[in-house]
Image (cartoon, rainbow, N blue to C red):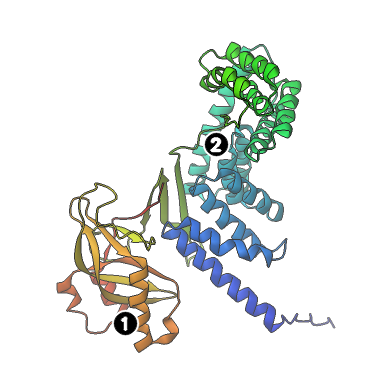
Amino acid sequence: MSKKSKRVKIPARQLLHSQLFEQQILHAQDQMLQGDFASAIKTCEPLLSHLPRRSPMRVQVLATIGLANGMLQRYDKSYECFTEALTIDPTNPNLWYNHGLACRYTGRVGQSMRDFERAIELLGDNRRDVARQFAEELEISRNEVQDTIEFIQEQGIDITMDQLIEHQECFRRGLNLAKKDKWEESEQAFRQLIEMGGGCLPQVWGNLGASLLIQHKYDEAEVALKRALEIDPEYTLARNNLEKLPDIQRTKGPLEMEIDGPSTENRKQTITFYKPNDDGSAPTPHTTIEKIGNIVKGTRTQVGKQSPCYSFFLNHYQDERFTTCPRCRIKTRPRKFSLVIHIAPVYLRLLEKTCRYCYQCDLLIVHQDQLEEQLTEHFTMVDPEMIGRDYMVIGTMKRSDRMKIQDDHATQEMIEYLHDFKETITFERV
C-alpha cells in the first residue's frame, strides 16, 4: 500500500505576500499598456528586494523592468535585467528574444544573433506568428554580423564568431566604465581590446583617445586619435577631440569628452502582449505598444461592436494640462465624452467626463489625476471596494447610445455600443 503524499502547508503571511506581489505585477503591466513605462519600473523595482533569487515571480518582475527600460531606450538596464532573468529561467524563448534586442542596441550584435537563434530553437513549431517575428530579428542581426566581419576582414584580420562576441563585450565594458567616469579602467579595457586584435575599428582608438585626454595623457591621446583617423578619415568624434587638444593642453581645465557607442536615438521599439486561449491553442496578441522617439502608440484587439474613434492620451503629468495639442500645437478645446472604463477584474463603468480635445488630430486627452478623483468620488458612494483597483479607459460611447442603457452594469449592452480607440498614445517629456 503506497503512502499518501504529504500536502505542504503554505504559511498565511507568505501567501498574502505572494498575492500582494501578483497585484503589483498586474498593476505594472497595466501601466505598461498605458505607455507609462517609468511608473511600471517604480512599481516593480521595490519587489526585487523581497522576491527570492530563483523564483518565477522574480523572472516576471525582471522581464517587466527590462521591457520598460527598453522602451525608454535605457538599453544597458534592459540588458542587465534580461541577463539575470535568463540565469533563473534559461528555457524561456521570450527572455532570449528580448535579451537579443538588448544586445543589439548595446552593440553586442554577435551575441544578439546567438540569442535569436536560441529563442527560435526553444519556441518550437506551435507559435508561427511569433516565430516569424523572431526570424525577422535574427535576419537583421545576421546581416549586421556579416557586415562587421567583412569590414574586419578587409583590414586583413581573420576573426571567429566567438572572438567577435568577446571583442564587443570588451568594447561595451570600456564604454560603461567611461560613463561612470572610471577613465583609467576604461583606458585599460580599450587597450585590452586592441591587444586582442580589436584595434581595426576607429571607435576603439577614438574612445581610447578620449579616456586618455580626460587623464591629461596628451601625447598618448594624440597618437590614439590620429590612429582612429587613419582607419576612417571621416570619423567625426576623433576629429572633434583632436581639434580640442591644443586648448585642453593650454587650459588644463575641466573636460567634457565625446565617447562613441551605439546610437539609440529614435529607435523603433515594440512590445506585443498575448492572452491565452480557452481551447489550449497558441496565445493570440491582444495589445501592441510601439515607441518611436518620445511618442508611444498602442493598439488593442477591438472589444466594442462599433467602429473605433479618436486617438487617446491619458495624461499622467499633473503640471501640464495640454491646452495646446502635443502633436500639431493647435489649441485644444474642452468637450464632454462618455468614457467606458474597465475596472479590474471584469467591471465596466460609464463615466461622463470633460476632456481636452484636438479637432485637427482627433485626439482625446484625459487628465489622469482628475479621472481618478472622479472615480474615487463615484465609488465612495456606490461601492468603496472598487477604490484603488487597476483600471483602463477602453473607449467611448455616443450620447444617443448612452441613453439606451438602463443598467450601468450591463456589460454586454456597453460592448454593443462601445467605440474602441483607434490608438492609445503617450507623449514623453524630452
User: Viewer-proximal residue, 101 or 188?
Assistant: 188
Query: Label 1: which residue?
Result: 409
Q: Quadrant of the N terminus?
A: bottom right
- Measured as percent of width and height from the top left, residue 291 is found at 42, 47
Residue drawn at 58 percent across, 17 percent down: 246
Q: In which quarter of the image is residue 121?
A: top right
User: Viewer-proximal residue, 320 or 101?
Assistant: 320
Q: Quadrant of residue 203?
A: top right
Label 1: how many residues lie within 10 Å, few (<14), some (14-19) or many (20+)? few
Residue drawn at 55 percent across, 28 percent down: 144
- Residue type, numbered disc 2: Leu
User: Viewer-proximal residue, 276 or 172?
Assistant: 172
Question: Left of 390 or right of it: where is 22?
Answer: right
Q: Can residue 405 be seen in this view?
A: yes
- Measured as percent of width and height from the top left, residue 401 is found at 18, 73
- Measured as percent of width and height from the top left, residue 297 is found at 37, 51
Query: Label 2: which residue?
Result: 138
In the depicted structure, whether residue 410 falls above or below residue 290:
below
